[in-house]
Image (spheres, rainbow, N blue to C red):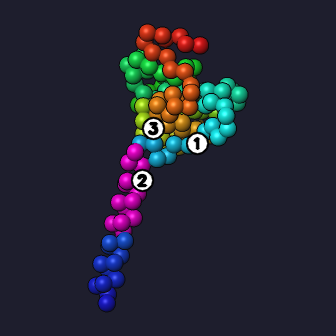
Amino acid sequence: MKRILIILGIITAIIVGMSFLFKNDSGDGNKEIVSQNSQTISAEIKSVGGQLIDVREPSEYAENHADGAINIPLGNIEKGDFTKIESDKPIYLYCRTGRRSNLAKIALENAGYENIIDIGGLIDWQNDGNKVCSSSTPACS
């Protein structure tokens, strides 16, 4: 009987561990719902005076990025470079798929920042009807 309980405990631990691992498999499992009404995310950011941060690499940002975003790569955030981040404004983060923006959110929260919203990936931004700037149209405001 004791062996059965031990085996059941191990199986349960494996199942719980596997579900935790695959919970964020899509990269946007922790994406927060930002705009629940008719306004776009960009309109919401403007209405609350928020800052939009692209946590991808500079080469990715140069290729295309959300209109109004500044580029602070995840690596810089993880190293504690918060010089471009205003702590008194809501922070909206995105990357390509949502994985790096989630990691950036965790790093910022661990550094004491509050009011951080992970909007997921650039495709989520586009699907919400927001503008994307590209290397051919760098200033799309």
- Is 20 left, or right, of 52 in this rendering? left
Q: Amino acid at mark 3?
A: Gly
- Is 48 left, or right, of 109 in this rendering? right
Q: Which residue is mark 3?
A: 98
Give, as a single range, the part of the protein colored magenta.
13-26
Q: Which residue is mark 2?
A: 23
Of mark 2 and mark 1, the one earlier in the sequence is: 2
Give the SS element for disc 1: loop
Of mark 3 and mark 2, the one earlier in the sequence is: 2
On the rendered image, what quadrant is the N terminus found in? bottom left
For label 2, count other residues whose C-alpha is less than 10 Å away and answer few (under 14), some (14-19) or many (20+).
Answer: few
Q: Name the chief secondary structure element in magenta.
A: helix
Q: State yes or no: discs 1 and 3 in contact (Cβ < 8 Å).
A: no
Give the SS element for disc 2: helix
Q: Amino acid at mark 1?
A: Ile
Task: Tell me what residue is drawn at x 51 percent, y 42 percent.
Answer: 31
Q: CA distance from mark 3 to mark 2?
A: 13 Å
- Residue 92 vs 102, above or below: the answer is above
- Residue 132 vs 2, above or below: the answer is above
Task: Tell me what residue is drawn at x 54 percent, y 36 percent.
Answer: 119
Q: Which residue is mark 1?
A: 33
Q: How many numbered marks are there?
A: 3
Of mark 1 and mark 3, the one earlier in the sequence is: 1
Is 23 magenta? The answer is yes
The quarter of the picture where residue 68 lies is top right
> In the rendering, at what x and y percent does residue 11 appear?
32, 72
Task: Tell me what residue is drawn at x 50 percent, y 46 percent.
Answer: 30
On the rendered image, what quadrant is the C terminus found in? top right
Is 87 magenta? The answer is no
Q: State yes or no: discs 2 and 1 in contact (Cβ < 8 Å).
A: no
Q: Amino acid at mark 2?
A: Lys
